[in-house]
Image (cartoon, helix red, strand yellow):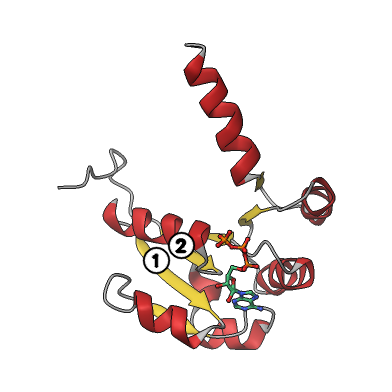
């Protein structure tokens, strides 16, 4: 059985973009006992995850009104896991900020993408491949 979060506090998280990275984030948060709403514009992806993610919805995350209708304005955290479309990533961050979400974590696919996300004021920018590569190198050397 999966290990549950030590923190008793149940978090309410929106995970936007359910590619390989977003899917992994969303499923792990659910395993850890948190409340997750997963959003993707691709109907096939939403269908594929419907059995494992209790709340998964097809929507365009650049549309702040659509997000509001889904209750995304109530979440504590949002994770924007859109890498390939810089426009989709940036507009999703702006839509979340319009809803008043303060704690936004976002994935960047390039250094420039990361810079733009930082300038937008997101709480944390992650570079999955680079971060994992650094972690693996450090593990290998016992750092
Ligand atoms: P990964 O490497 O995690 O598989 P990726 O970096 O290639 O993903 P993308 O393919 O850009 O990232 O996006 C990940 C997911 O985000 C896709 O499933 C895509 O359908 C979804 N997505 C992209 N734009 C939007 C949008 N505007 N609204 C909702 N979902 C979106």
Residue 92 lies left or right of residue 16; in this view the side is right
Q: Say if 107 sits above or below 63 in the image.
A: above
Q: Nearer the viewer, residue 111 or 55?
A: 111
Above or below, 42 against 7 in this view is below
The answer to whether 30 is drawn above or below residue 41 in the figure is: above
Which element is circle 1 on? strand
The dot on residue 13 is 2
Q: Residues within 10 Å of mark 2 (few under 14, many from 20)?
A: many
Q: Quadrant of residue 35?
A: bottom left
Q: From what the image shows, is residue 7 above or below residue 81?
A: above
Q: Is residue 108 visible?
A: yes
Q: Residues within 10 Å of mark 1 (few under 14, many from 20)?
A: many
Given contact means CB atoms under 8 Å apart, are the residues at marks 2 and 1 in contact? yes
Residue lying at 65% horizontally and 74% vertically, measured from the top left = 99
Residue ranking furthest to the left: 1
Image x and y of residue 108, in percent: 70, 52
The residue carrying mark 1 is 36
Which corner quadrant of the figure contains ligand 1?
bottom right
State left or right for residue 1 relative to residue 59.
left
| Spatial separation of the CA atoms under disc 2 and disc 1 | 5 Å
What is the quadrant of residue 113 in the picture? Answer: bottom right
User: Residue at 38% of width from left, 84% of height from top?
Assistant: 47
Q: Earlier in the sequence, mark 2 or mark 1?
A: 2
Q: Which one is nearer the viewer's eye here, 38 or 50?
A: 50
Say which residue appears at 60% left-offset and 28% top-offset.
Answer: 134
Residue 132: image x %, image y %?
Answer: 55, 36
Q: Residue 77 at what x, y percent from top left?
A: 53, 58
Where residue 62 appears, x then y in whole percent? Answer: 69, 79
The secondary element bearing badge 2 is classed as strand
């Amino acid at each position: 059985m999966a290990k549950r979060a030590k923190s008793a506090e149940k978090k309410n998280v929106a995970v936007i973009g359910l590619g390989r990275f977003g899917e992994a984030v969303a499923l792990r948060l659910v395993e850890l006992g948190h409340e997750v709403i997963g959003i993707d514009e691709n109907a096939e992806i939403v269908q594929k995850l419907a059995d494992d993610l209790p709340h998964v919805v097809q929507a365009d995350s650049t549309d702040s009104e659509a997000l509001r209708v889904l209750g995304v304005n109530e979440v504590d955290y949002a994770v924007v896991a859109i890498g390939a479309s810089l426009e989709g990533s940036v507009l999703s961050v702006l839509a979340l900020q319009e809803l008043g979400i303060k704690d936004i974590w976002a994935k960047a696919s390039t250094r420039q993408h990361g810079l733009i996300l930082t300038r937008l004021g997101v709480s944390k920018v992650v570079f999955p491949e680079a971060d994992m590569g650094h972690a693996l190198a450090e593990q290998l050397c016992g750092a």
